[in-house]
Amino acid sequence: MTTEKTYEELVEYQKVTQKWLGKKKDNENTKLGYAITKKMTKIIEKALKPLAELDEKLFEEMNDARAEFALTDSNTKKFVYDITKDKDGNEVQNYAYTVKGRKDREDKIKNIKKAHLEAGEALLSQKATIETYYATEIPADLTIEEMEAFKGIVIDPGNA
């Protein structure tokens, strides 16, 4: 059996399942725990993959913008780096920029983030088809939030 859930609902499901599984040591050893664990991998692989790919694209485009506006040595054409220390005293190497290069980089990154935010919001409202697996026993101590998140994925809506 399958159901359609928005990506936003699936993100919420994922958060609530992690919280529920960690709430009590034995939650995983219940029929609901089995159903959640069984569905979790499939949901992460299939339904949440587009969100992860969107994040990967964001970081890639931001790194491209950092490299695009970075300062290079006029003779060797190699990147010039600023060497600083982090809070632990370790050396950190970052691209160096001219004042204009830094401004251009920040403007481009701001536009990249805005475009990705819009794409992410659009994706969250889209629906994904997932296979359901309903637990045959539901713990009596589920919260309303847990019941709502699990309903239609691991809890039969007719029994909720």
Image: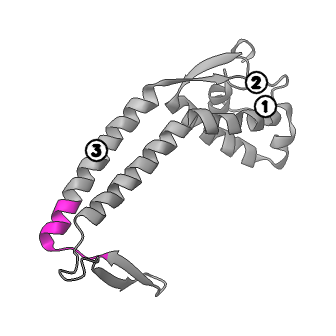
**Nearer to the camera, 120 or 138:** 120
Residue beneath disc 1:
35
Residue beneath disc 2:
133
Helix, strand or loop: magenta stretch: helix
Image side of residue 46 versus residue 88, left or right:
right
Which quarter of the image is occupied by the N terminus? Answer: top right
Q: Which residues are magenta?
A: 95-105
Distance from the alpha carbon under mark 1 to that under mark 2: 6 Å
104 is higher (above) or lower (below) than 88: above
Distance from the alpha carbon under mark 2 to that under mark 3: 37 Å
Q: Amino acid at mark 1?
A: Ala
Q: How many marks?
A: 3
* Residue 133 on the magenta span: no
> Counting residues from the N terminus, which is met first, the one under dot 1 or under dot 2?
1
Secondary structure category for the residue under label 3: helix
Residue 135: mark:
none
* Residue drawn at (19%, 67%) of the image: 102
Q: Amino acid at mark 3?
A: Lys
Which quarter of the image is occupied by the C terminus? Answer: top right
Question: How packed is label 1: few (under 14 Cα within 10 Å), some, or many (20 or more)?
Answer: many
**Nearer to the camera, 87 or 108:** 108
**Nearer to the camera, 68 or 101:** 68
> In the rendering, at what x and y percent does residue 12 appear?
56, 36
Residue beneath disc 3:
114
